[in-house]
Image (cartoon, rainbow, N blue to C red):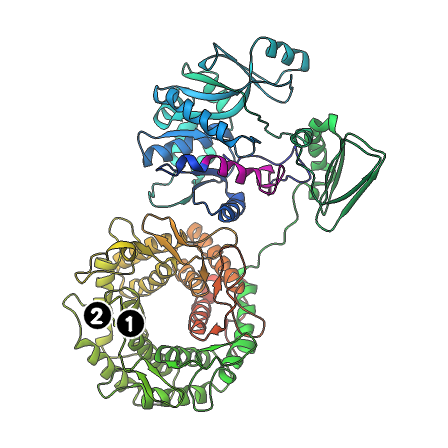
Amino acid sequence: MCGGAGTRLWPASRPSRPKQFLSLTGSRSLFQDTVSRVVPLVQTGGELIVVAGVAHRHWIAEQLDELGVTARILLEPDGRGSAAAMAAAAIRIHALDPDGIAAFVASDHHIPDHAAFRAALIQAVDGARDGRIVTLGVRPTSPSEAYGYIKPAGRGLSAVEAFVEKPDAPTAARHIENGYLWNSGNFIAAARTLIAEMQALAPEVERAARAAVPTDPGAFRQTLTEAFLAAPDISIDYAVMEKTRLASVLEVDFAWSDLGAWDAIFAAGTGNSGDHVLEDSSDCLIRAAEGTLVAAVGVSNLAIIVEADAVLVCDLSRAQAVKPLVDTLRSRAPRHLDFPTAPPEALAPGGRRFADWLRLRALPTWSTLGQTGNGLFVEALSLDGRDTGRPHRARVQARQIFVYAEAGRLGWIGPWQRIVSTALARIQADYLRDDGLSRTLISASGAALDDTPRLYDQAFVLLALATVHAAGHEDAALEDTAVRLREALLRQVLPNGGFAEAGDHPYQANAHMHLLEACLAWESAGGDPGWSTLADDLVALALDAFIAPDGGFLREFFRADWTPAEGEDGTLVEPGHQFEWAWLLTRYGQGRGDARALTAASDLYAAGRRGVTDRPEIVIDALNADGSVRSRQARLWPQTEWLKAALILAETAEPDTRAILLEDAATALRALWLYLTPDGLWHDKHLPGGGFVPEPAPASSLYHIMAGFQQLAASWPALVSNGGAPLSLD
């Protein structure tokens, strides 16, 4: 449970970065320590669930990634106290496992003995199985005014006689003499037990939480709906524990602190950080921001906490007064209540910058350094602009023809017609076989290196021809060439309307996706009715075979009967392809008025959205069918597909949904900018820990980049307010 307003440990802890995400007792954050403490308990079939505010999703994602831990995440639209958070978690757990036992663990506590804590949770489970709600009561080491107290009926696991609010020092001392325990704020209960007690004792909390929990069973990250805001803002102690007859307490004696103030951080003994020099000083806690040196002479018992915009100097004995100080800052210096952040780039300025980058950088670079004198496009350019010398695939030639033909259609004044003409001549001379199909690979001299007619390559040759035709390029044979290739393909069609691909995965969705894209391009360009017929067959195959009927997501690989492939191949879900199919099915559904296709597109968009990480917000490469992460690497191309799908869906969405989709589009464009370099090149693979794989820029990515811009330009008039002139490349 990751709540917290970030006030008592100001200025290091603030609303956008509360204390659980700080490294206060070592190299890892309190949240990471908590995850490490409990994750062994779920390694034999349990689940780790994080409940937190939506504003903190970035910290959670980043810090879980650093640990290499996967968790289900429930995000609150706004905090409503521990009762509502626990109710939402219990309802989610009960949906996953009606017999599930939950340990509700605070994410910001300091418990050095991880094994002892786990042993206590396991012991408390016995009480939870008997229908009790068990809290951990810590044997006090001193009369603290910072903690609430519990009066147990006996030793070990026992009933609770009373809960007591934070007392003054004399009262705390008496409580310790009378055997009271510190209230640790950790609870263990069966999900069904807690839900039943909520229904009886805090029904408004339970109703709001139930209404807010999404029903999607496969999502590993879910945001509670606005219904959550109807829950009263109340703690679990007030809502349930002080009223229920099921409360029990387990006495524990391991070291524990909730690190509620700077004196507690000092007492933990590991809170100092940053550069500092002390002379003739003692018993001080020093935390210096990066690049700042703290020097002190002749002082003692002080906390000196330095951040970039604020400094706290506090007598450690007055550490509890920091919270009232923060209340004073609300009127006197509100800008220092949280860390300053620059607003993210909006869609309109990002789109104009995108157009400039294509017009001034990428298109000139890839039409000069990226195309040889004989018309062939190179496969990749090193990041210093050098050809890598690889053989030339048909798909890359076709994709680059698409790029420059589309650039010409969108107003680019560069020599796109010459570029397209020379490349088309090489397609016709060196790639097209006698049967009208395209071979896969040739050398720089035009010699055939792989004569295989892959479906994937045929799709892109068809797309290139359609785009050149739509751009008004004067070549009367374009449509004849495309129809001949299509008819050659149709001679190989399978009984269900699909096609077998060459290679290790003959029955796959991806090649069909690009063939559908080519059919829709020819349909839009005024091609014969055969393109619409083939598009109808491909969409039917996608709706009936590729998309899981019980999950709304699209699989990648299949058996010969088009049921899911065996093993890991059959459970692979690529978020980028969910978005790409969503974009295509929306185009198709809007053109045909096909409600089934439009519903499928919406479901696929939601499935793709599960693959968007939080820090940074980018689309990762692969999930499993159950929604868990398979690969946290993130290639460039899924970012463009997210952009395209968000834009086209936004065009016909209701206002509230449209606003969400447009923000998604702006986020997707910002994600794409992470990959692009100022000189018109790009990185391809973002690593889970940050940074990119050091490798040349693949030419094939320019197809995705241009397709993203193509959809942005098409959606611009309807979606971008105050966007000014139409978005173009002139």
Q: What separation in Å lies between label 1 and label 2 (alpha carbons)? A: 10 Å
Residue at point 30%, 75% (across, down) = 459
Name the secondary structure under disc 1.
helix
Mark 1 or 2: in front is: 2
Q: Seen in the image, is 472 located left or right of residue 370?
A: left
Which is nearer the eye, 508 or 550? 508
> Residue 163: where, in percent of width, then height?
52, 15
Q: Seen in the image, is 579 located left or right of residue 546?
A: right
Residue 711: which quarter of the image?
bottom left
Residue 378 at least partly seen: yes
In this figure, which residue is indicated by the disc labeled 2?
A: 499
Q: Earlier in the sequence, mark 1 or mark 2?
A: 2
> Residue 398: where, in percent of width, then height?
37, 80
344, above or below 451, in the image: above
Residue 231 at least partly seen: no
Amino acid tagged 2:
Phe
Which is nearer the eye, 644 or 300? 300
Amino acid tagged 1:
Leu
In this figure, which residue is indicated by the disc labeled 1?
A: 515
Residue at point 36%, 23% (across, down) = 193
Q: Within 10 angstroms of label 1, few (less than 14), some, or many (20 or more) residues?
A: many
Q: Within 10 angstroms of label 2, few (less than 14), some, or many (20 or more) residues?
A: many
| Magenta span | 16-38
44, above or below 427, in the image: above
Q: Seen in the image, is 533 located left or right of residue 11?
A: left
Residue at point 53%, 64% (across, down) = 673
694, above or below 29, in the image: below
Q: Are marks 1 and 2 in contact (CB under 8 Å)?
A: yes
> Residue 335: where, in percent of width, then height?
69, 44
